[in-house]
Image (cartoon, coloured by chain):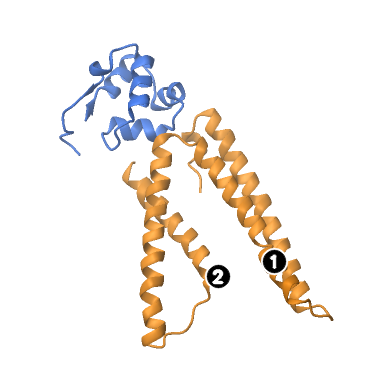
Amino acid sequence: MRNRLKVLRAERNWSQADLADRLEVSRQSVNAIETGKYDPSLPLAFKIARVFALPIEQIFSDEVEAAS
Amino acid sequence: MTCEPGDLPPKAKQASRAYIRDMAIAAVVYVGVVFGAVTLIRHMPFSLPQWAVVIVALTPLIPALMMMRTYMTYLRSMDELGRRIQTEAWLISAGAVGLGTFTYSFLEEWAHFPRIDLVWIFPALIFFWGLGTFIVRGRYK
């Protein structure tokens, strides 16, 4: 699964730690999601969508990560 | 085994500190209980009846249960990736210790390898859990 977390975070000038605080997860979790090493659960994906105020499909797409 | 404090959100930091504190308390209780039990069973001028020895021999279970409760509380405070890492680490540990003891039991029985006490199984589980956590956490970095 691909995601635009890194781009969206950069647009808001948030560090990984800032986003992790907003999502109430560890910074390692944010990093693992951004790098495609970990796909979040549906509840966490919805929480991410709420934090960025975007529909979930504008953040995640059902494509295989090319780099993984 | 905890995450680096800087990596954790405030609630998880609190849980991490409580985990370290409660584990330390349980470890102190464990040392006290084992010291007391050994003194009662081996170094007293009188010998305890068998039923009392059984009860004394079961007392290390109390701090072990305290540790387990502390760990479970800490596990529930983790985020989903933390819980996944822990699950995979325990699977590695169960696999390593399960296969290790299974294999060694044949070596003991048929090849007359030295007997190993059952008391080493729990420390082995903890060792491979720690190793598993290190390996699995590295995969998500």
Do callouts 1 and 2 mark residues in contact (Cβ within 8 Å)? no
Q: Which mark is residue B34?
A: 1
Q: Earlier in the sequence, mark 1 or mark 2?
A: 1
Specify the chain shown as orange. Answer: B
Picture coordinates of residue A28 (x, y %)? 39, 36
- Quarter occupied by residue B140: top left
Image quadrant in which the C terminus of chain A is located: top left
Specify the chain shown as blue. Answer: A
Question: Is A53 on the left-hand or right-hand side of A24?
Answer: left
Spatial CA distance of label 1 from label 2 is 13 Å
Callout 1, which amino acid? Val
Question: Is B33 on the left-hand or right-hand side of B79?
Answer: right
Mark 2 lies on a secondary structure that is: helix
Picture coordinates of residue B46 (x, y %)? 83, 80
Query: Measuring 40% from the left and 84% from the top, which residue is drawn there?
Result: B109
Query: Measuring 51% from the left and 38% from the top, which residue is drawn there?
Result: B76
Which residue lies most toward the top here?
A53
- Quarter occupied by residue A29: top left
Query: Measuring 56% from the left and 41% from the top, which residue is drawn there?
Result: B73
Mark 1 lies on a secondary structure that is: helix
